[in-house]
Image (tube, helix red, strand yellow):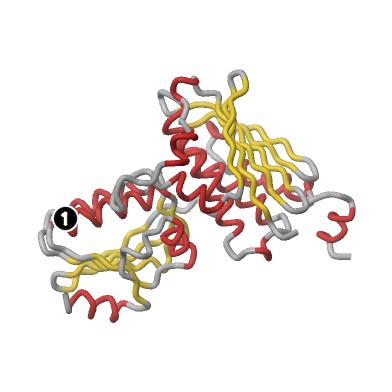
Amino acid sequence: MNLNIFLKRRGCMFDSKLVSAILKDYISKFPAKDKESLTLEIDDSSIVISLIGDIHSLRIINVLVNVIFKNVDIQNSDQFLVFDLCLAIEESLINIFKHSYPKNCGQVELRVKFETDRIVIKVSDYGEKGHSFNYAEQLKKTPESEFSESGRGMMIIKKIIDDIKYSTDNDRNTLLLIKKWKG
Amino acid sequence: MEKMDDLQIFQEKKGNMLILRLKGIMDSSTCMQFGILFKEIADHPGMHLILNLKELTYINSIGIGTIVSNVRKIQNTDGMVCFYQVSNEVKHVFDLTGLSNIFFFFDDEDSAFKFLAGN
């Protein structure tokens, strides 16, 4: 039986042992400072990555996210689905490192849950509320001019993601991104 | 390692046209080297730029912002910029950001060259 069909019948969205082994292999090649701050939790349908870093940590997270999405059977539904999800996550993290932490460095958490017809992504930070990125305001904004250097991150997220919500619970700020896919 | 590649920039000058071939990824870690190179181009008024993005496999909003703001600088010095052989992924990001409508894209270097020579 095809492994993906077998896993789906068991209610699993991917082979967590296989993905975990691949991720650990990648992590073993990361620089020591990134490895030290990185934690990874994985089960049959979700993944949690936590990292203390800065904008240069995006590469690390993007590598892991790429591996995860490429090992879940979602690629046939849309040519750019995996690329888009990785990009939306990266843009969310760029916003955190640029706006949530005064020194552009801090803890981020990425939670990805694969459901039968949608992918639920939560990107969280623990930045001071006063410094947190104002998503309500940013979601309405467009770049000031076609040639401006910034302001395209939220535009990209809005184009890719079906449902976006922002919440603050105690010290944790979370951007919820829901992407529907044809399971 | 996948997606850990840096950005390589290959330059070729033909008259007042500079052809840049970008290979790798353009993000927060690599866009600065592109910005430095762009500044040198903008210092030569009337210089046109042709960008080959066939081997640029990834770009995010920071990379797009770097290209866009520097294209503007070249245009301000009477230069023109166009793109050719843009990879599907990078063209997709140009589409997502609505920039496909304001830049010129060509299938090959010859077409890009003729376009700039005629302007």
Asked which secondary structure carries label 1, the reply is: helix
Q: Given the current orientation, which residue lies at the most extreme left position?
A: B45
- Of A37 and A86, the residue lying toward us: A86
Q: Position of residue A41 (x, y in %)?
A: 72, 36
Q: Identify which residue is drawn at 87% across, 58% down.
A: A6
Q: Identify which residue is drawn at 18% across, 70% down.
A: B17
Direction from residue A134 to residue B17 in the image, left or right:
left
| The quadrant where residue B14 appears | bottom left
Q: Identify which residue is drawn at 42% across, 33% down.
A: A98
Residue B39 seen in this snapshot: yes
Q: Position of residue A81 (x, y in %)?
A: 61, 58
Direction from residue B115 to residue A124 in the image, left or right:
right
Check the picture and name the quadrant holding the C terminus of chain A: bottom right
Dot 1 amino acid type: Ala
Direction from residue A129 to residue A76 in the image, left or right:
right
Q: Position of residue A179 (x, y in %)?
A: 64, 50
Label 1 lies in what chain?
B
| The quadrant where residue B7 appears | bottom left
Q: Identify which residue is drawn at 84% across, 64% down.
A: A2
Residue A24 seen in this snapshot: no
- Of B80 and A146, the residue lying toward us: A146
| Residue bearing the label numbered 1 | B42
